[in-house]
Image (tube, helix red, strand yellow):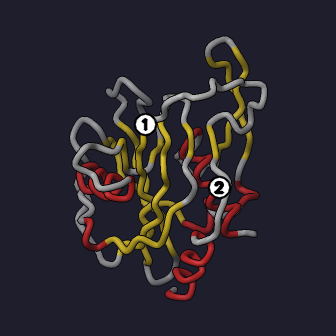
Amino acid sequence: MSDRFQSFRAALAQTGVESSDFDLNPEVTLPKGRALRPAGVLAPVVDTGTRLELILTKRSSALKHHPGQIAFPGGKQDGGDVDVIAAALREAREEIGLPSEIVDVLGVLPAHETVTGFSVTPVIGHVTRDFTVVPEPGEVEEVFRVPLDHVLNPSNYIVHSRRWRGQRRYYYTVPYGPYYIWGATARMLRAWATRMNK
């Protein structure tokens, strides 16, 4: 699988276009000069020996924001974080118990703008050895894995829509089994899939 990780590094080293929660909704006019808060999320990849798997989380249904949604471990950059990569690694340690020292950062994707006002940088990392998953109480309801080939296949993506703030909003989904992966998480994964399939 080492050749696969080298292909990830090469693809992630290319320049790319930033993505947005508004990509499928071109009629939305975003205010110029808006201030976005920096954040980082980690896409942790595990090599099982037979396939590569991506670790994702299901947010607690008790949370005020995005309850029950599928997400990458990650969050906003704090004052103690050197950069968004450090923020992603710190948040992964806090949310799922992933030690930062066993993550080999392969690269980053261009930032993704969310409807909540964040500029989120997806950080792609190879988890180099086993670790004990420890979900953060009250934040993470479940930690699970999906085959990486599933989310890196553009044909597995479907565009769905729903009404949001009085308007019809379109967004990407990439369902897997019982997991409905959608919104910003699916859009960032779709950007990665596009990058890998150029």
Can residue 36 be seen?
A: yes
Badge 2 is on which residue?
A: 191
Give x and y (percent) for residue 145.
45, 60
Residue at 71 percent across and 24 percent down: it is 29
Give x and y (percent) for residue 8.
57, 75
Can residue 180 be seen?
A: no
Q: Quadrant of the C terminus?
A: bottom right
* Secondary-structure class at tag 2: helix
Which residue type carries mark 2? Ala
Q: How many marks?
A: 2
Residue found farthest to the front: 33
Q: Earlier in the sequence, mark 2 or mark 1?
A: 1
- Mark 1: few/some/many CA within 10 Å (<14, 14-19, 20+): some
Give x and y (percent) for residue 146.
51, 60
Q: Is residue 195 above or below residue 70?
A: below
Which residue type carries mark 1? Arg
Residue at 48 percent across and 52 percent down: it is 121
Residue at 42 percent across and 60 percent down: it is 55
* Secondary-structure class at tag 1: strand
- Mark 2: few/some/many CA within 10 Å (<14, 14-19, 20+): many
Q: Is residue 21 left or right of residue 51?
A: right
Q: Is residue 48 left or right of residue 183?
A: left
Q: Is residue 185 left or right of residue 38?
A: right
Of tags 2 and 1, which is closer to the observer?
Answer: 1
Q: Is residue 160 above or below residue 30?
A: below
* Contact between labelled residues 1 and 2, with CB atoms less than 8 Å apart: no
Q: Residues under labels 2 and 1: Cα distance?
A: 20 Å
Q: Nearer the viewer, residue 181 or 81?
A: 81
Residue at 62 percent across and 36 percent down: it is 21
Q: Is residue 68 above or below residue 195?
A: above
Q: Nearer the viewer, residue 147 or 41?
A: 41
Question: Residue 37's mark?
Answer: 1
